[in-house]
Amino acid sequence: MPHDFHVNFQGELNSLRYYHPTQQPLSGESYGKTMTDPDPQSKATSSDMPPRPEPGTPPDYNILTPAFEKLCDVIARLRSPEGCPWDREQTLESIKPYTLEETYELLEAIDSGNDQHIIEELGDLLLQIILDAQIAADEGRFDLTHIVDRLTKKMIDRHPHVFGNVNAETPDEVRKNWDQIKEQEKQRRSIFDGLPQDLPALARAARVAEKAAKVGYDFPHRDMLFDKLREEIQELADEIYPDGIIPETRATVEAEIIADTEVVDAKSRHRVEGELGDILFVVANIARRWKINPEEALRKSNRKFQQRVEKIEQELEQTGRSIQEASLQEMEKIYQAVKKQEKLNP
């Protein structure tokens, strides 16, 4: 969101954050209360923590209800004629990029393990939902109550092993029941109906293959995927190299730098792109068969590489130099040292 401000609403709300007068740390029995700790990095000690509630204990509605009401009032006020010009002009379509951005920021916060960051990003994502609902209500389409009612009904209907008489003792049985109920609800013609087109490509590859696997279209043994991967790599080599033979070039920084050349011919480029896509699709399937989320795996590798390069920048900065001034060999030396240190201190 482009604005980050404090509001004074009906003389009660001093910010978009709800402060409960008990000011207890957010954990255990204080679930549903908001911390007033000014330091987002701080963590309460174990001696400060109330006992953890039993799993499945709902929030304290005496605390949650007024807090949620205040939040809804704030969003409604922002959309009112006396509210914020930016919020008033938003539509469900215009707000989409912010929803996606906040989702990824939440993923980063979860990866950080910092509860305060997670609280903030969950709040930002909740804001997107309430704002979407308010926009729809202002347009006379639906409101937040419709969303909550439909979600509640769906969760009850799709968990007959909890709220009905169906038996499901394992997660696999639960998923099977879920898929059957969902299929009955949606009356879809294809196994791929309902799969979002805008999913990240690697994540969608795994989901597409998973859908096909559920009806039996899958390799009988997961090890066969590596044979398929070798096949796809060879098909890529056939497009890239005239003789289809991949040169045996050792990966080292102690070599002459050779400039890359791109595939200029449009038809050749299209074929190379297709073969690269096939390789990535097989890799996503390997991840799926070993119960690994390929999107999450790649995201973590991206972050790991970035952090290592940032370490290179920091090491060079201590010597008064920038990364642009370092040689490839210098950078690789620091990179390998960082990698070694990571293994010593996982």
Image (cartoon, rainbow, N blue to C red):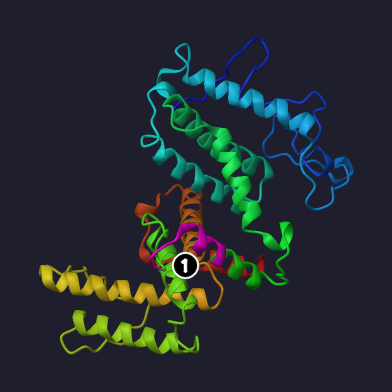
- The x, y position of residue 224, in whole percent, is 45, 89
Residue position marked by numbered label 1 in the rendering: 333
Question: Quick check: 117 above or below 84?
Answer: below
Quadrant in the picture for the C terminus: bottom right
Numbered label tally: 1
Question: Quick check: 275 above or below 234?
Answer: above
Instruction: Identify the amino acid type marked 1.
Output: Lys
Q: What is the chief secondary structure element of the magenta stretch?
A: helix
Residue placed at 60% from the left, 13% from the top?
A: 8
Question: Quick check: 193 above or below 80?
Answer: below
- For the residue pair 88 and 224, the one nearer the viewer reads as 88
- The x, y position of residue 105, in whole percent, is 52, 45
Is residue 37 visible to the viewer in this orientation of the structure?
Answer: no
Is residue 225 a member of the stretch shown in magenta? no
Residue placed at 85% from the left, 42% from the top?
A: 49
Is residue 181 a member of the stretch shown in magenta? yes
Please provide the residue range marked out in magenta: 180-190
- For the residue pair 63 and 192, the one nearer the viewer reads as 192
User: Please, what secondary structure does the residue beneath circle 1 have?
Assistant: helix
Question: Quick check: 3 above or below 216?
Answer: above
Residue placed at 81% from the left, 33% from the top?
A: 24
- For the residue pair 209 and 244, the one nearer the viewer reads as 209
Tell me which corner region of the image, top left, top right, bottom left or bottom right, holds residue 119: top right
Left or right: residue 81 compared with residue 247? right
Seen as rendered, the residue at the extreme left is 265
- The x, y position of residue 274, in whole percent, is 25, 73
Tell me which corner region of the image, top left, top right, bottom left or bottom right, holds residue 328: bottom left
Is residue 65 visible to the viewer in this orientation of the structure?
Answer: yes
Residue placed at 44% from the left, 13% from the top?
A: 81
Left or right: residue 48 compared with residue 279? right
Tell me which corner region of the image, top left, top right, bottom left or bottom right, holds residue 121: top right
